[in-house]
Amino acid sequence: MRSLGTFGRLFKRINSLQLVLTLAGSGALAVAAPGCRVDEQDLARWETTQRGPDKIRAVVTHDKYELNLRVEAALSLIRMPARGGRFVGIDILVESLGATPAGDREKIVNGLIPAIIVQLKKDPPAAQAGQPAPPDPSFPYKDASYALLLASENPALVSDEKLRSDLRAALIEWAMKDFERRLENRNQKYGMEQLMRMLGSDGVKQLPEKVTRESRQLDKIASLVDELGTPSTREAASAKYVEIARWIVTQAWIDAKKPLVEAANASLPKPPTADEFKAQLETYQDEEFARLLGALKRVGGRAAVDFCLEYAADGKNKKERRMFSLAALELRLDPKNAEDVKRVFSIATSDAPPEVLDLAFRRISEMPRDAVIEKLYEAFKTDKWKVRRSAASIVLKMATETKHIDEFFSKLPLDKEPKGFARGEAINYGAMIGDVAKLDHRAIVDKYLPEVTPIAQRVSAASFYLVHGKPDDVKKTLAALELDKVPLPVCDAADEECKWTCYVPKDGKPSESELREVKTFGEYVKLCVEPAIAEREKK
């Protein structure tokens, strides 16, 4: 009995202790429950703690939390500082919204987007005099906007069309407010160029307004307009770039840049002379003009074409700057615009330096054959053989059929003794004829070898063999021409490049060669064409 009494008392004590613990536990929960409610202060603290991102994710995704808190949690993920250089908060936000049921997601997004737009519309922080600008707190909101709009989950995270439209408009406004600093900022998850590409043509519509004399990003603006701009945006930018180009080549530009060059010279051990300083400014001006025209080339547009043609045509302008202008016209001339074709041909056939002429002909070569062929043949009539050679080279590059080659031969000088038809021309033509694919080249050129044919045609045909001939051609075709006495074309005595000369074995020293003038068609074949074939065969 005694032992049972002891056991009974022990059992009663245990039951009493369980009751106390149960009541105490219930009381503790009842007290702790209000203190465990998550609020905005918790979210702010979690933004910087190790496990914080997971806790904030839980608030976004769980429907036990009030809508306002879930929206605030989404904003916390946006504000969250980068961790290890990675903006994990925005990635978690996108993942969390994608995992949230559609009804709840729509409610969260409907509250989140207006809050983001408020932040995007704030003015960027202004820099104090002599101080760098303070950090821009709007970048995370831009990055989050980009991620939300770009997310390709099915369904889209921002499904409401008005919200999407409002957010896009806010992003465009944000980008244009402080474009250059925001473009240059490297502390962002998605760069400005990525943003512009997502926004498309709407995103760059206002960029022409950023093309100013003070802009540091003229090249980048040009690239974005070229890639994304509509024709109207391109034209607006073109006009702005031309305004700057015209300013750069003025004395006003030099006056504005003098202090910069003087400041740079101040650190030199020996200051430049007046002439050296002038040369510095001119070189600086050339470089800036070339850089500006590089941007103008990407933008194109009517204003750009008109300016470049005008500048390249003016013989008073520096050769190099005229060349920059023609280079900027690459693939920008309109072959359907008769005035464009006329103006570039006027430059190509002028007395401009050879480098300018060459670039003008390059621009012509970019146009369709039908648009320029007659103008090219008009250029054949010039007494400047280098101009004719440039025009003829384009004609032959455009040739694809036998009739094109025959037409080319018919446009060469038809005089029995043409003046100024150069050996370099003939060799160039012969080489290019052989480069035209899928033609019976020998059948074509052999028609122009007989003595009754005008000499310009004959030497051009014979030069095909000089470049493309084989040993069998000597026996079959060329040997019969060695005694031909028809005089070669006549060149100006002062024009060394025009003259008909070949390297031939020295008399009495056949192992050595010397440059000798050839006078007849037969000599050209025997002393120039056939030795070239033999030399090529040795290799």
Image: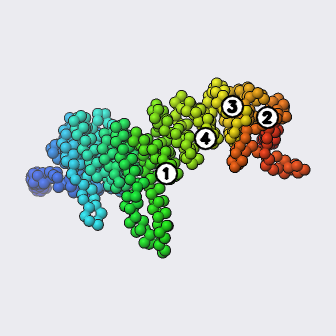
Residue 372 visible, this angle: yes
| Crowd band around label 1 with a 10 angstrom C-alpha radius: few (<14), some (14–19), many (20+) | few
Q: CA distance from mark 2 to mark 4?
A: 26 Å
Q: CA distance from mark 2 to mark 1?
A: 45 Å
Sequence-wise first label, 1 or 3: 1
* Badge nearest the viewer, 4 or 1: 1
Q: CA distance from mark 2 to mark 3?
A: 14 Å
Residue 471 visible, this angle: no
Q: CA distance from mark 4 to mark 1?
A: 21 Å
* Side (left or right) of 160 relative to 217: left
Q: Which residue is mark 4?
A: 387
Residue 414 bears which disc, if any? Answer: 3
Position of 343 relative to 138 (above/below): above
Sequence-wise first label, 4 or 1: 1
Figure quadrant of the C terminus: top right
Figure quadrant of the N terminus: bottom left
| Crowd band around label 4 with a 10 angstrom C-alpha radius: few (<14), some (14–19), many (20+) | many
Q: Which residue is mark 1?
A: 316
Sequence-wise first label, 2 or 1: 1
Q: Residue 107 location, x and y as percent?
A: 19, 38
The three-letter amino acid code for the residue at tag 3 is Leu
Residue 486 bears which disc, if any? Answer: 2
